[in-house]
Amino acid sequence: QNLAASTVRNRLAYLKAACRYAWRRHGLTEYDPTGRMELPAVNNARVVLTPVRDLERLLAAIAHDESRACFALAFYTGSRWISEIHCRQPGDVIRVGRDILLQIGMTKTGTPRTVPVPPAARWALRYLPFRLGSHSMFQKFAAARTTVGMAGFRVHDMRHVLGGDIIRRTGSIRDVMDALHHQSVQSANRYSAMQFGRLKRILGGVGVGRKTHTSKSRRKLKMAA
């Protein structure tokens, strides 16, 4: 098969996570079987600058309630839709006071993860467990993106949209790492250009609106001196 480098890397990452889980949790081997495993380098610096309002318009155009719920839940929790959301069960939902959490389980990095479900996505929890297959769900997504004129938009791009929105609101790479569960700064640094744009706007406002001396007032000051 002619697979993209990113696909090969992702599949190897899933295999690595499974092997590490078997070693850590069940002690099937004496040492980490993936200790010398190297993942191919991938240039995945693609960043999508789609506004959140356009993504919400895309989600609203998905003509299937269960599919819309799956993609919405993935976006608002910063999760991967197939490996972390499509397989979720009602038992993965945890209620702590007014907060609602979702247990994602083992991520591709081999670590467990629990994420808060924001109010904008809580409606989607009533569709758990998802019964429609992932391939059929993707077809619903593909039809919706064509409908709203976003044919080149990928499902994974939802994570980029969330990362970009976080930068615009907080300006913090650390926040992006936490929300998208990045293990390295390098993965989150793709949003540094957005961070620079936000910093430029902030610094560009310094001194704006303050009273400054005009040439006439400067002459008066000089004469008085």
Image (spheres, grey):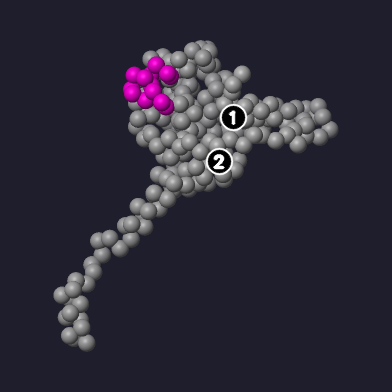
Seen at 41% across and 39% down, the residue is 165
Residue that mark 2 sits on = 187
In the image, which residues are magenta? 141-153
Looking at numbered disc 1 in the image, what kind of residue is underneath it?
Ala
Labelled disc at residue 5: 1
Can you say whether 129 is above or below 40 in the image?
above
Residue 10 shows in the view: no
Residue ID at (35%, 52%): 201
Q: Is residue 177 left or right of residue 68?
A: right
Please give the name of the residue rendered at 36% of the width and 19% of the height, measured from the top-left corner. Answer: 146
In this image, 111 relative to 132: left or right?
A: right
Which of 90 and 189 lies nearest the eye of the viewer? 189
The three-letter code of the residue at mark 2 reads Ser
Q: How crowded is mark 1: few (under 14 residues within 10 Å), some or many (20 or more)?
A: few
Name the residue furthest bottom. Answer: 225
Give the quadrant of the C terminus. Answer: bottom left
- Depth check, front residue: 196 or 65: 196
Q: Residue 17: within the magenta?
A: no
**Of marks 1 and 2, the one in the foreground:** 1
- Which of these two is toward me, 72 or 95? 72
> Please, which residue is most extreme toward the front here?
2
Measured as percent of width and height from the top left, residue 82 is found at 55, 22
Q: Where is residue 26 in the image (x, y as percent from the top left)?
A: 78, 27
Tell me the distance, in whole angstroms, between the alpha carbons under discs 1 and 2. 16 Å
Position of residue 125 relative to residue 221, above or below, is above
Left or right: 205 with respect to 23?
Answer: left
**Dot 1 and dot 2 residues touching (CB under 8 Å):** no
Q: What element carries label 2?
A: helix
Q: Please tell me in which quadrant of the rendered image residue 161 appears.
A: top left
How dense is the environment of label 2, judged by Cα within 10 Å: few (below 14), some, or many (20 and up)? some
